[in-house]
Structure formats: structure tokens, C-alpha cells
Image: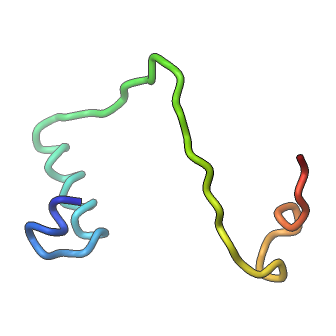
């Protein structure tokens, strides 16, 4: 998010600009991951009445 800081623009604008810059330079990011990927746990809160039915029940 360096563009956000340097140019004082929103994240949406910086994402759009970055995509345009990559397109101009012909830079593609289609690399597959070679090794395992580690992901941290995430907790997203919200009221059950606002969630989808399948998200309201925990299955472990």
C-alpha cells in the first residue's frame, strides 16, 4: 500500500493504478505456489441474523 501513502490516494485508486502500471509493462503474476502456504486464523464477527444460513452453524 505504498501508493496510498506516497500519492495520498484511496486503496481502490491505488489498486486500479497498479493494475494499469502492470498492464503497461506487461507484468503478469500467474505464478503458482511451489511449497506449502501457511495461513493464520481469522475471526470475523457479525450478528447471526445477518449471516447466511450455512454460516450460522459451526461444524468442527
Q: Position of residue 27 (x, y in %)?
A: 19, 34
Position of 13 relative to 58 (above/below): below
For residue 48, which quarter of the picture? Answer: bottom right
Q: What residue do we see at 91% from left, 62% from top?
A: 57
Q: Position of residue 24 (x, y in %)?
A: 12, 44
Q: What residue do we see at 36% from left, 29% from top?
A: 30
Position of 20 relative to 26 (above/below): below
Position of 32 relative to 11 (above/below): above
Q: Position of residue 32 (x, y in %)?
A: 43, 23
Q: Please indicate whether residue 35 sits to the left or right of residue 9 in the image.
A: right
Q: Quadrant of the N terminus?
A: bottom left
Residue farthest toward the top in the current orientation of the protein:
34
For residue 28, which quarter of the picture? Answer: top left
Q: Please indicate whether residue 51 sits to the left or right of residue 8 in the image.
A: right
Q: Position of residue 19 (x, y in %)?
A: 24, 51
Q: What residue do we see at 11% from left, 38% from top?
A: 25
Position of 56 relative to 36 (above/below): below
Q: Tag count in the figure?
A: 0
Q: Please indicate whether residue 58 sits to the left or right of residue 30 in the image.
A: right
Colour convention: rainbow
Q: What residue do we see at 15% from left, 62% from top?
A: 3
Amino acid at each position: 500500500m505504498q501508493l496510498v501513502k506516497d500519492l495520498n490516494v484511496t486503496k481502490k485508486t491505488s489498486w486500479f493504478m497498479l493494475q494499469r502500471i502492470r498492464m503497461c509493462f506487461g507484468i503478469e503474476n500467474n505464478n503458482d505456489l511451489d511449497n506449502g502456504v501457511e495461513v493464520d486464523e481469522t475471526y470475523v464477527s457479525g450478528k447471526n441474523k445477518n449471516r447466511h444460513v450455512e454460516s450460522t452453524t459451526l461444524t468442527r
